[in-house]
């Protein structure tokens, strides 16, 4: 332990025996450390008596010089302890509205129940804007659809697997009675997708390119919820993520359209800045997701 901390502890406790007991160390260890400090300073800090120790005049002068620094150190130590114990702090999370609602919300609820004194700030935007905010230090972490842009300044950790599909309401289920190719689907039926430059749309565009299909959706919509809503009222066939449309598929408001080509799975990822120290609260939230 720093000899100054021994000095402060002994000052407030007033007893070498009690100070040693509080630190679970021997009395000679404290005595030796204080003696060393006195030798380095060239003064006597404490008068020792039958009732304990008290500051000498030089000891009082020394304390006046270091008092402000000591108080700042103690306050900082208390603050750090509170942060480590998750008694205070803030997490600033960036994600799309869809990911926040359908993936993050249960984790946010669980984290808040465990650590109610931690403030949680959510920023919803497109991935490229969120990454810019993360780099500026305005956000602590992102949860985004992968793949995202390659960037050596970021740490990207996959945290969940997603499966996309095409889905329509009952009228389209009746029209498409067997497996259909992607090309026939987009040629003969109106397709509803998220508007560019969403990662989901980028993934769909990539799928079409790999299959050499010219793709022009009937409806481009910013909101993922509206993509589902348009499909539910029969405006066309939507491109959706199964995990984010669980209720609609289970309650048969939407039906998966059987596609001959296999749609690859994709992932959600946690994104952190590479050269930044992660806060205790952020680490605990990430631990909650990854476990």
Image (cartoon, rainbow, N blue to C red):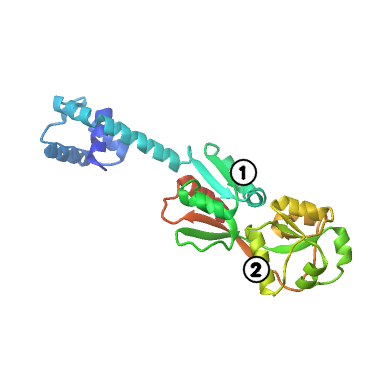
Residue 109's mark?
A: 1
Find the distance from the CA under tag 2 to the CA under tag 1. 35 Å
Number of other residues with Cα within 10 Å of mark 1, as a class: few under 14, some 14 to 19, many 20 or more: few
Q: For this rendering, which residue is in front, 197 or 178?
A: 197
Element at label 2:
helix
Could you tell whether 115 is left or right of 83 in the image?
Answer: right
Q: Which of the two labelled residues, at mark 2 and mark 1, occupies the earlier sequence position?
A: 1
Residue 171 shows in this picture = yes
Q: Is residue 266 above or below residue 24?
A: below
Q: Is residue 93 above or below residue 218?
A: above
Could you tell whether 224 is left or right of 156 in the image?
Answer: right
Residue 291 shows in this picture = no
Number of other residues with Cα within 10 Å of mark 2, as a class: few under 14, some 14 to 19, many 20 or more: few
Residue 153's mark?
A: none
From the top left corner, tell me how far across and down residue 98 is, in percent.
66, 51
From the top left corner, tell me how far across and down residue 187 is, in percent.
80, 69
Question: What residue appears at the point 32 percent right and 33 percent down from the top-left corner?
Answer: 72
Element at label 1:
helix
Residue picked out by circle 2: 206
Could you tell whether 258 is left or right of 224 in the image?
Answer: right
Could you tell whether 174 is left or right of 100 in the image?
Answer: right
Q: For this rendering, which residue is in front, 220 or 239?
A: 220
């Amino acid at each position: 332990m720093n000899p100054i901390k021994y000095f402060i502890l002994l000052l407030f406790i007033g007893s070498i025996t009690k100070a040693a007991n509080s630190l679970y160390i021997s009395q000679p260890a404290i005595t030796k450390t204080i003696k060393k400090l006195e030798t380095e300073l060239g003064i006597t800090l404490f008068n020792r008596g039958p009732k304990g120790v008290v500051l000498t005049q030089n000891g009082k002068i020394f304390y006046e010089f270091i008092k402000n620094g000591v108080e700042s150190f103690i306050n900082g130590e208390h603050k750090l302890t509170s942060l480590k114990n998750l008694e205070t702090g803030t997490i600033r999370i960036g994600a799309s509205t869809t990911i926040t609602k359908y993936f993050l919300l249960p984790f946010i609820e669980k984290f808040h129940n465990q650590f109610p004194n931690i403030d949680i700030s959510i920023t919803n935007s497109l991935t490229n804007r969120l990454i810019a905010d993360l780099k500026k230090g305005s956000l602590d972490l992102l949860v985004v659809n992968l793949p995202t842009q390659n960037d050596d300044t970021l740490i990207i950790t996959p945290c969940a697997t997603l499966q996309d599909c095409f889905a329509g309401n009952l009228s389209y289920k009746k029209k498409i009675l067997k497996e259909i190719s992607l090309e026939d689907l987009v040629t003969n039926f109106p397709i509803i997708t998220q508007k560019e430059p969403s990662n989901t749309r980028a993934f769909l565009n990539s799928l079409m390119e790999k299959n050499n299909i010219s793709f022009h959706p009937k409806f481009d919509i910013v909101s993922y919820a509206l993509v589902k809503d348009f499909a539910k009222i029969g405006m066309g066939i939507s491109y959706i993520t199964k995990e984010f449309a669980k209720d609609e598929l289970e309650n048969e408001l939407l039906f998966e359209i059987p596609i001959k080509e296999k749609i690859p799975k994709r992932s959600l990822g946690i994104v952190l800045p590479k050269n930044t120290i992660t806060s205790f609260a952020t680490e605990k939230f990430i631990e909650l997701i990854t476990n």
